[in-house]
Amino acid sequence: MAINLQKGERADLALPKFTIGLGWDVNESHSGSEFDLDASVFMLGNNRKIPADEYFVFYNNLESPDKSVKHSGDNRTGAGDGDDETLSVDLSVINPAIQELCVVVTIHDAVTRKQNFGQVRNSFIRIYDANSNQEILRYELGEDFSIETAVEFGRIYKRENRWRFEAVGAGQRGGLQEYVDRYAG
């Protein structure tokens, strides 16, 4: 049975290989440009910076150099039920310098299209065993991010030689570039 987390809650990740599924829907009342939400992972060292650009996994870099994080590719519409984008993670082969995986979702070209997360609903992050399709944990973002164009959904971090997940749910207005600026080495 999956653990349902609330913002700020944490859970142990005992499984070395898993998939992160992210999903969202656009409010029916929204009209205009299509929404293109993008999942990204910043693989951080102890200094909370990426050791090299290749440790930023997103739609233009689908795999980390150590092959521990693989992105499913860009889903430009988010149509349909279930996961809109997925990230496969194998902690057994992760670079030992990596201590944290920061999972963010941003709205592509949000300023030009006048879009924000207030126009998005049913947002979630879940971690599941890809072999059995059994969900391990889930965090549903219940907040209304009416001006934010990017949200850190969660983070996976290593403490005392154990990997844990934290439900973060923190939004900001600077889009993907603000995260790149924050985590670039």
Image: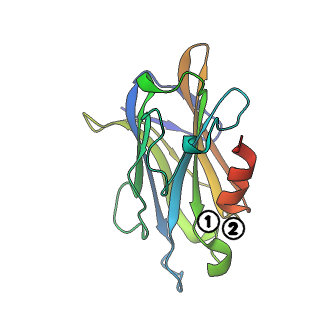
Q: Is residue 90 above or below residue 111?
A: above
Q: Residue 34 location, x and y as percent?
A: 49, 78
115 vs 3, left or right, is right
Q: Residues within 10 Å of mark 1 (few under 14, many from 20)?
A: many
Colour mapping used in the image: rainbow
93 vs 106, left or right, is left
Foreground pick, 95 / 38: 95
Q: Residue at x 51, y 52 (%)?
A: 58
Asked where in the image residue 50 lies, by quadrant, the reply is: top right
- How many numbered tags mark residues here? 2
For label 2, the residue is 146
Q: CA distance from mark 2 to mark 1?
A: 6 Å
Q: Residue at x 48, y 40 (%)?
A: 64
Q: Quadrant of the C terminus?
A: top right
Amino acid carrying label 2: it is: Ser
Find numbered disc 2 in the image and state the secondary structure of the residue it sits on. Answer: loop
Q: Residue 179 location, x and y as percent?
A: 69, 51
Q: Residue 140 location, x and y as percent?
A: 52, 49
Foreground pick, 134 / 67: 67
Q: Residue at x 55, y 21 (%)?
A: 96
Q: Is residue 51 above or below residue 12?
A: below
Numbered badge on residue 117: 1
Is mark 2 in CB contact (under 8 Å) with mark 1?
yes
Amino acid carrying label 1: it is: Phe
Foreground pick, 81 / 151: 151
